Amino acid sequence: MSEFQDLSTLIAQIAHAEDSEQVSQLNELIEAGLESGSVALILEAFPLEGRVRLWRGLPLELHIEVLTEARAEVRHSIIKELSETELKLTLAKLDNLSLIEWADSLPEEIINEALHLIEKDELELYDQANEYQDDELGRWAERKVVTLPFNISVEKAKVLMERYSYDAPQQIYLINKRKQFRGLVNYIDLLRAEPSERLRSIAVENVLTLNAKLTLAESVEALEHSSLSTMPVTDDEQLLIGEVDWHFALSTQREIYESRLMAGTGMDEGDDLFAPVVKSSQKRGVWLGINLMTAILASVTIGLFEEVIAQVVALAVLMPIVASMGGIAGSQTLTLMIRAMALNQITSGNRWALLKNEVGIGSINGLLWALIIGGLAGLWFQSSIIGATIALAIVVNIITAAMFGVLIPIALDKLKLDPALAGSVILTTVTDVVGFFAFLGTASLVML
């Protein structure tokens, strides 16, 4: 496009147009340079009927690309509306990477039909990708790369490039007879080199490779620190698997971020903005049920001290402060831990030091805010006992929150559970129960 336009502006522009004009407006934006990822986001902003109409009106060569860029539920919602003929025509155009992306979000019968319809070469690449786990780089590497023997001349290389009608690639990968990686050459350097030179003599020096067994998070970090826009992916024997580029890194990083953001509320990054009401209610209802169980646990703790609360109304007024201070302190530590774990910064060698550091921070903040809150509460209710009681509870709860903010994500990670998904719920329960117990337990000892 000639200049950047905010996506919300484009969505509003299309939404305010007549139905008959919406498709033509979207296609005009595509002709002006709107990329497929943005097209997918625009489709997601429309209810089902509108998004299907817009998708059908796209240029045929963009159908697969836009569906692949869309969220899983959005993709499924469009596919369910296709006729049998439309579905077969769509599935037949799938490439191996798109099929991998679709495989986890579509019914098995659709995937099986796609396996019968796609081209043989794409099916072979799909089978190769499935040798790796979902979180391993080898599953997502682009296998369609230009390769040449590492010891041939530049003149021979140019002949081979013309014979096989290769598009001008950014990089050419050099391999030996066993298809082991031996270096890479920038295409522009190939064009400038003398015909008699050998490819290995113009290869880029000190090229790092990514092992196909790396996790996606690890591979994104490697790409971030690389001077190359693409990096070769190899197996343990240095056989060339394919490549990944910075587009892959950005997309993966966004998915990791969205996954952690949504997981905190029990949702998935593939959820549809306009998902069916009943289906969404069921998914969210489960999380509300989990939250109810934790709330009941906190309420039971409060119920143990019903007698003292009934006699001293000030305790009921001050209880939310105890829970809130512990919750905030704990969420700060938990957020720090989740980010560090995502960056692979937490190891067995630094856990104890990190725990001591967070408990130290919690102790200082706990004492500081205990003095402030205790003083204010004492003045408010004209009772030094109430002030001292809430001060003690604040200290205990903030230190506990800091400690469990470190321990909970480590424990969940050991159990192969996502700390972003369950960490906040468990931590909130711990801080509520400990805070209420410390506050009301102390009050029951000194006031009855």
Image (tube, rainbow, N blue to C red):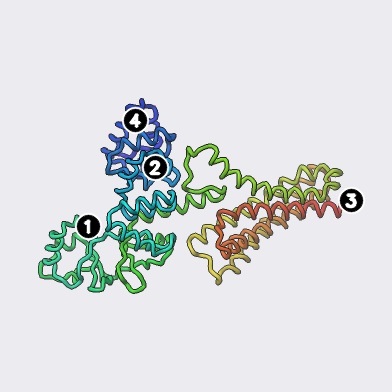
Q: Secondary structure at mark 1?
A: loop
Q: Which mark is residue 22?
A: 4
User: x, y (%) of residue 202?
Assistant: 19, 68
Label 4 residue SS = helix
* In this view, the mark in front (1 or 3): 1
Q: Which residue is located at x 20 percent, y 60 percent?
A: 187
Is residue 262 something that shows in the picture? yes
The tag earlier along the polypeptide, 3 or 2, is: 2
Residue type pointed to by label 3: Leu
Question: Is disc 1 in contact with disc 2, using a CB cutoff of under 8 Å?
Answer: no
Mark 3 surroundings within 10 Å by alpha-carbon count, few (fewer than 14), some (14 through 19), many (20 or more): few
Amino acid, disc 2: Ile
Q: Secondary structure at mark 3?
A: loop
Per the model, the C-alpha gap separating discs 1 and 3 is 81 Å
Residue under label 2:
79
Residue 448's disc number? 3
Mark 1 / mark 4, whichever is N-terminal: 4
- Work out whether residue 150 or residue 117 is closer to the camera in this orientation and state it: 117
Q: In the rendering, at what x and y percent does residue 363 appear?
A: 68, 60
Q: Amino acid at mark 1?
A: Pro
The CA distance from mark 3 to mark 2 is 67 Å
Mark-to-mark CA distance, 2 and 4: 20 Å
Q: Earlier in the sequence, mark 1 or mark 2?
A: 2
